[in-house]
């Protein structure tokens, strides 16, 4: 097991990474305020992992309540969120009951948002079961649901007490979901960690083959990058926004195509290619740099071409992005590979050109 911390003064919390960890009660018990938990999972993950986690806690005298939600990004909404509140209220959960989010990014986001809201805040623990959630969404306290006009537009910053990333849960992950997680892993190399990117270029096939040592290294390095950023900028007032490389374009794809049609990591990969094209138009990246980025996404099994929507539709959706400031769209671009910047200097014409360069030809 490898461990690191997200340093947030009195709200500092550990991330544990390794094999066979998700049902280790001794990792969880020290973080419970009382011996009652509500485990939120979904219809895909619960049949595989929920019983073992619940049994491990019950053997130590913990009362376990379970909430099983439908699976999919399309359910990341108010109606499904209320299913969590219905159970919490029916079971008379108090603000010292701990909510455990057991699942991927959707469950982590919704479980965390429910925890932030219920009785104005209950403790929660993240046990992410997808690569994307292990390296990104479970760390840093971003919680949210979607709105028809924009992804993750309704939510709260709310930090967990603990994150447990069990690499064994990735063995049951579909290939497409694994590839989607690699998009966020590659992102860290592109925005701030060129040494990690070089390692990824030499080891991407090991990750696709789910070699435990390679996965553990990539998850640890990704979490270390994110933990350092979150510790310095918890509420995304500066450096943390760099983590959104490709996301403004990618969220437009997810919203415009319908939530769940594209996986988040797939949309981020295509969006990152649009950001790379725009960075090249700005004179910051060479065509060789753009091709280098496309190659690693291709090797990871990720799309480098975006959804077939007119550039005008992309721009319309991007104007709902959370990084819009005083009506001005700000984007995360690459000054060079390994160095991201937040900028508002790109014109709509340039943004449209970058989008067009990554649209399907037919």
Image: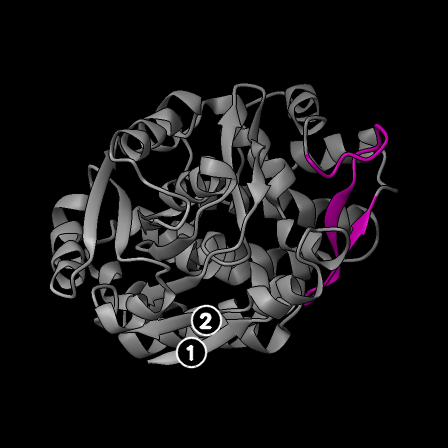
Relative side of 323 to 44, left or right: right
Q: Is residue 254 above or below residue 134?
A: above
Q: Position of residue 81 (x, y in %)?
A: 39, 29
Q: Is residue 288 above or below residue 105?
A: below
Residue 84 placement: quadrant: top left
Q: Position of residue 13 (x, y in %)?
A: 49, 68
The residue located at (42%, 34%) in the rendering is: 262
Q: Quadrant of the N terminus?
A: bottom left
Relative side of 1 to 112, left or right: left
| Residue 331 located within the stretch drawn in magenta | yes
Residue 106 placement: quadrant: top left
| Residue 86 located within the stretch drawn in magenta | no
Residue 76 appears in the picture as rendered: yes
- Please tell me which residue lies in front, 319 or 335: 319
Structural distance between the alpha carbons of marks 1 and 2:
7 Å
Q: Position of residue 322 (x, y in %)?
A: 69, 36
Q: Which residue is mark 1?
A: 3
- The span shown in magenta is 322-343
Q: Which residue is mark 2?
A: 14
- Asked if disc 1 and disc 2 are in contact, CB closer than 8 Å, the reply is yes
Q: Considering the numbered disc 2 on the image, is that residue within a helix, a strand or a loop?
A: strand
Q: Position of residue 359 (x, y in %)?
A: 58, 32
The residue located at (68%, 32%) in the rendering is: 321
The mark found on residue 298 in the picture is none
Relative side of 39 to 237, left or right: left
- Across the whole image, how many numbered discs are drawn on residues? 2
Query: Crowding at label 2, few (<14), some or many (≥20) Cα neighbours within 10 Å?
Result: some
- Please tell me which residue lies in front, 276 or 145: 145
Residue 61 placement: quadrant: bottom left
Residue 360 appears in the picture as rendered: no
């Amino acid at each position: 097991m490898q461990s690191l911390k997200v340093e947030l003064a009195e709200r500092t919390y550990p991330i544990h990474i390794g094999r066979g960890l998700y049902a280790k009660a001794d990792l969880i018990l020290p973080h419970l305020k009382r011996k009652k938990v509500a485990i939120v999972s979904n219809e895909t993950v619960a049949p595989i992992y929920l019983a073992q986690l619940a049994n491990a806690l019950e053997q130590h005298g913990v009362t376990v309540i379970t909430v099983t939600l439908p699976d999919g990004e399309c359910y990341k909404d108010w109606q499904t969120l209320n299913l969590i509140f219905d159970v919490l209220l029916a079971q008379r959960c108090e603000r010292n009951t701990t909510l455990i989010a057991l699942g991927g990014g959707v469950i982590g986001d919704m479980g965390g948002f429910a925890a932030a809201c219920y009785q104005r805040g209950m403790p929660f623990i993240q046990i992410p079961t997808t690569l994307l959630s292990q390296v990104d969404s479970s760390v840093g306290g971003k919680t949210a649901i979607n709105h028809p006009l924009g992804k993750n537009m309704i939510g709260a910053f709310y930090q967990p007490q603990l994150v447990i990333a069990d690499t064994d849960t990735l063995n049951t992950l579909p290939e497409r979901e694994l590839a989607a997680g690699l998009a966020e892993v590659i992102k860290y190399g592109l925005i701030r960690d060129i040494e990690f990117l070089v390692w990824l270029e030499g080891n991407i096939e090991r990750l696709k083959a789910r070699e435990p040592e390679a996965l553990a290294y990539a998850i640890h390095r990704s979490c270390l990058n994110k933990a350092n950023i979150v510790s310095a900028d918890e509420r995304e007032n500066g450096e943390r926004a760099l983590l959104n490389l490709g996301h403004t374009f990618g969220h437009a794809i997810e919203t415009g195509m319908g939530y769940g049609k594209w996986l988040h990591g797939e949309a981020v990969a295509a969006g990152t290619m649009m950001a790379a094209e725009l960075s090249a138009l700005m004179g910051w990246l060479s065509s060789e740099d753009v091709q280098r980025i496309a190659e690693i996404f291709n090797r990871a099994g990720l799309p480098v071409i975006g959804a077939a929507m007119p550039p005008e539709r992309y721009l319309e959706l991007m104007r709902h992005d959370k990084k819009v400031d005083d009506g001005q769209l700000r984007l995360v671009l690459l000054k060079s590979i390994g160095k991201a910047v937040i900028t508002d200097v790109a014109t709509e014409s340039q943004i449209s050109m970058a989008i067009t360069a990554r649209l399907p030809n037919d």
